[in-house]
Image (cartoon, rainbow, N blue to C red):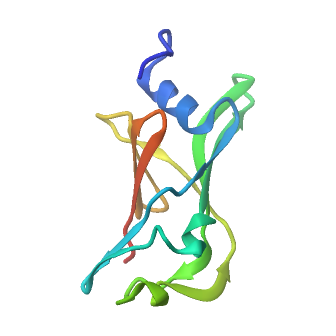
Amino acid sequence: MNRYKYIGKREETTLILASRHQKVWKVASARLTNIHGTLEMSTSNKIRGVEFMFFRSANPQTSGYGDLHVEYRLGYAINTSARILADCFSDTYLDPMKSELFFDDVDETLLTGFAGQCRLSLIHEQNVSLVWAFW
């Protein structure tokens, strides 16, 4: 994965997720796990529109880019207690949500955001695993 030979792991992770300025990732697969079991949501038309835009904030002190952020473009609210796929999404549209991402102290391919509810792991350059805890 380290084609960026002269930079650290944190900067490499940031470049993969956000490129130089920003990069949009689309959801390829999604599952909802709750007390009723696990629902495969990947086939839903509403999940296909979900996007995550990773971007770097401007850092005027270095005339470069600094902290990593994410904008979560869900679209429709998720019913986290759904028993069947048809009940997973409501008709309520949600505005995009933004959060700064924080790197793990030990593994700089692990990040958290949205007050700890979102945990993200960079698997490789084409694959990001994201777990969202609804509580």
The residue under the point 37% across, 77% down is 135
Instruction: Give the x, y percent position of residue 4.
Output: 51, 15
**Residue 88 or 120: which is nearer the viewer?**
88
**Residue 8 or 131: which is nearer the viewer?**
131
Q: Is 89 on the left-hand or right-hand side of 96?
A: left
Asked if 82 appears above or below 42 in the picture, the reply is below
Task: Count up the numbered dots.
Answer: 0
- Farthest residue to the top: give it: 6
Instruction: Give the x, y percent position of residue 34.
Output: 29, 80
Asked if 117 appears above or below 81 in the picture, the reply is above
The residue under the point 47% across, 10% down is 5
Instruction: Give the x, y percent position of residue 8.
Output: 45, 19
Q: Quadrant of residue 98?
A: bottom right
Q: Is 131 on the left-hand or right-hand side of 47?
A: left
Asked if 19 appears above or below 115 in the picture, the reply is above
Instruction: Give the x, y percent position of residue 43.
Output: 49, 71
Quarter containing the N terminus: top left
